[in-house]
Image: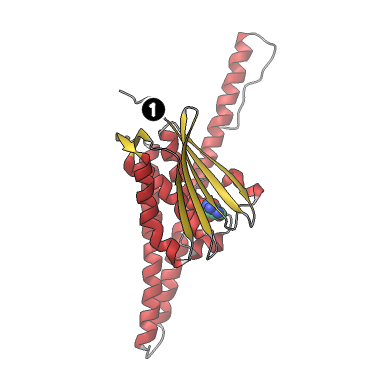
C-alpha cells in the first residue's frame, strides 16, 4: 500500500531510516501515478485516430450510391489517420527502447557542422512550403563523439517543430558554437512561441500547448520527449526560452568529451 508511512519520533538513526523510507514510498507513489497517466494517455491518443477511422468507414458503409469522388475523399482521410497511428506507435517504440536502456549509443567521431547541414537539407522542402528561411551560422568546425542517427533524430524533431510552429514567411536561425565544456546547437524561430506556464511541460510525453493545432500539424506530442531522452543519454541537456508571438529558442548542449562507458 503506497499510502502508508511510518511514524517518525525523535532524531536518532532509526527515525532517519524512517524518513528515508517515507521518502522512498512517496517517490514510488509518484512513479506509479506517472505510469497510470502514461497508460491513460496512450489509450486516449490511440483512440482518437481509431474513432475517426471508424466514423469515416461507417459513414461510407451507410450511404447508398456513394460517388467515386466521395469514396476517394474519405479513403484519403482514413489513410491520414492510419499514418498518424503509425507515427504514434513508432514514437512510442522509440521511447520504450530508450526506457529499457536498450538504446545503446553508437558513438562515432562526427563532423557536427555537416550533420546539422544534413538535417537542414532534409527539412528544407517543409520549410520551403511555408516560405520559411533557414539560416545556419557556424563559427568553427566541430568534431565530437556522438551517435549520429540519434542526434540527427533529436535535432530533426526540434527543427521540424520550429517549422511547424512558425507562420509562413518566418525565419529559423541555427547556430553551432563551443561554450566552455560543451558544444551548443541553438535553434531559434520567430514563430508563435510557448506560453510561460507551458514551458515546464513541453518535454513531457504527449504534452501539447494546443492539442487542436498539434493535431492539424500532425504532431504526436512525443517529439521533444524523444529529443530530450536522446540528448540526456549523451550526457547533455536541452534548454528552452520562449515568448508568445515572438518566437522560441532551443539550446542543445552536448559535452565535448563524453564519458563513454566501456
Ligand atoms: P508535437 O508532436 O505536438 O510537436 P513535441 O513533443 O515535439 O510534440 O512538442 C510539444 C509541444 O511543444 C508542441 O505541441 C508545441 O505546443 C510546443 N512546441 C514545441 N516546439 C515549439 C516551437 N518551436 N514553437 C512553439 N511551440 C513549440
User: Which residue position is annotated with label 1?
Assistant: 258
Q: Which image quadrant for residue 27?
A: top right
- Residue at position x 44%, y 58% in the image: 46
Viewer-closest of 166 and 211: 166
Where's the C terminus, which quadrant?
Answer: top left
**Relative depth, front residue between 224 and 56:** 224
Viewer-proximal residue among 5 and 170:
170
Q: Residue furthest bottom?
A: 65
Q: Residue, x 40% and y 38% (percent of image)?
A: 99
SS class of the residue under badge 1? loop
Which residue lies at the image location 66% right of the left edge and 20% below the top edge? 7
Asked if residue 89 can be seen in this view, the reply is: no
In the orientation shown, which residue stands out farthest toward the top? 12
Q: Does the image show residue 14? A: yes
Q: Based on the displayed image, in which of its 4 quarters is residue 67 positioned?
A: bottom left
Residue 190 on image: x %, y %: 57, 55
Q: Which residue lies at the image location 63% right of the left edge and 55% below the top edge?
A: 246
Residue 11 vertical placement versus 139 (above, below): above
> x and y percent of residue 188 in the render?
53, 49
Q: Is mark 1 within 8 Å of ligand 1?
A: no
Point out residue 57 in the picture as x, y percentages from the top left corner: 39, 75
Seen in the picture, residue 256 relative to 75 is either above or below; the reply is above
Q: Is residue 15 above or below residue 58?
A: above
Q: Looking at the rendering, in which quadrant would you find the N terminus?
A: top right
Mark 1, Cα crowd under 10 Å, few <14 / some 14-19 / many 20+, is: some
Amino acid at each position: 500500500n503506497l499510502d502508508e508511512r511510518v511514524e517518525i519520533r525523535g532524531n536518532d538513526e532509526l527515525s532517519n531510516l524512517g524518513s528515508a523510507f517515507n521518502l522512498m514510498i512517496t517517490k514510488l507513489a509518484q512513479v506509479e501515478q506517472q505510469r497510470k497517466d502514461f497508460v491513460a494517455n496512450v489509450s486516449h491518443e490511440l483512440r482518437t485516430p481509431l474513432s475517426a477511422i471508424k466514423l469515416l468507414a461507417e459513414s461510407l458503409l451507410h450511404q447508398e450510391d456513394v460517388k467515386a469522388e466521395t469514396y476517394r475523399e474519405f479513403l484519403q482521410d482514413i489513410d491520414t489517420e492510419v499514418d498518424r497511428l503509425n507515427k504514434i506507435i513508432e514514437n512510442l517504440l522509440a521511447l520504450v527502447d530508450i526506457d529499457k536502456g536498450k538504446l545503446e549509443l553508437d558513438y562515432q567521431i562526427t563532423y557536427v557542422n555537416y550533420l546539422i547541414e544534413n538535417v537542414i537539407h532534409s527539412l528544407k522542402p517543409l520549410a520551403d512550403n511555408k516560405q520559411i528561411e533557414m539560416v545556419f551560422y557556424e563559427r568553427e568546425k566541430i568534431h565530437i563523439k556522438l551517435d549520429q542517427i540519434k542526434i540527427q533524430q533529436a535535432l530533426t524533431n526540434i527543427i521540424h517543430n520550429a517549422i511547424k510552429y512558425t507562420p509562413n514567411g518566418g525565419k529559423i536561425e541555427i547556430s553551432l558554437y563551443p561554450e566552455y565544456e560543451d558544444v551548443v546547437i541553438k535553434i531559434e524561430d520567430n514563430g508563435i512561441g510557448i506560453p510561460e506556464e507551458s514551458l515546464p511541460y513541453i518535454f513531457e510525453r504527449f504534452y501539447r500547448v494546443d492539442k487542436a493545432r498539434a493535431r492539424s500539424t500532425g504532431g504526436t506530442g512525443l517529439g521533444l520527449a524523444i529529443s530530450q531522452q536522446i540528448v540526456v543519454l549523451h550526457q547533455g541537456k536541452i534548454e528552452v526560452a520562449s515568448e508568445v508571438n515572438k518566437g522560441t529558442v532551443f539550446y542543445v548542449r552536448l559535452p565535448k568529451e563524453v564519458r563513454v562507458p566501456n
